[in-house]
Image: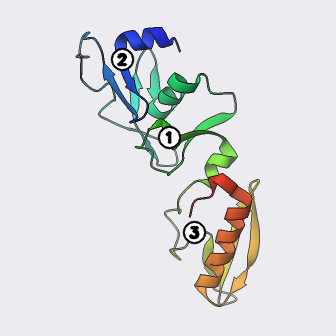
Amino acid sequence: MNKEYVDEWLIVNADEGTVFWRKSRGLAKAGKSAIHKHEITSRGGAKYKAISFGRRQWLLHRFIWTYVHGEIPDGMVIDHIDGDTSNNSIKNLRIASKSESSFNKGMFKNNTSGVKGVYWDKKNKKWMAYGRINGKMKNLGRYSSIEDAKNAADTFRRVNFKEFYRW
């Protein structure tokens, strides 16, 4: 990314995660947002804001990160700390491996217990706590109360995911 060229055409406010046109050209009007009105949906269903600039379409969080910190190393991604993909403030973005970024996911849509990392084991009639690490599911035990299972799953994630832990 050529920062001088970016600054010639765009006003980038990394603290707020916003980008505005500095100059008018075609449909782009000075002072208007450069962020697309439509969002890009990932295979996992997450929605991301995007801009088109320099003959390229950018996901906004990747554009903001690159503008402030430079190129993203191979194999790394930009993670939204609070899990909100619409919050593209530089303070909410961090570099992460794909695995680390996956630790920061919210609850899956098909979760029936309402608690992350816990499901009802019909056979044993207990709450089952589990965690995933290095792509493998780890059994954290069966519990009579959902609260005990939740505590076991939370403790596992807090210990193993460190700064990427999210409730």
Q: Position of residue 146 (x, y in %)?
A: 59, 84
Please say if 99 is above or below 49. Answer: below
Report the residue at 76% width, 67% height from top: 138
Dot 3 crowding, Cα within 10 Å, few <14, some 14–19, many 20+: many
Residue with the mark numbered 1: 91
Mark earlier in primary sequence (2, 3): 2
Percent of width and height locating residue 24: 24, 11
Q: Amino acid at mark 1?
A: Lys
Q: Nearer the viewer, mark 1 or mark 2?
A: 1
Q: Quadrant of residue 54?
A: top left
Residue nearer the viewer, 148 or 143: 148
Report the amino acid beneath label 2: Leu
Instruction: Mark 1 or mark 2: name the one nearer the start of the chain.
Output: 2
Q: Where residue 121 is drawn, which disc sits there?
A: none
Where is mark 3, residue-wise? 116
Instruction: Residue at 49%, 13% (x, y): give it.
Output: 3
In the picture of the structure, the residue carrying the numbered disc 2 is: 10
In space, the residues marked 1 and 2 are separated at their CA atoms by 20 Å
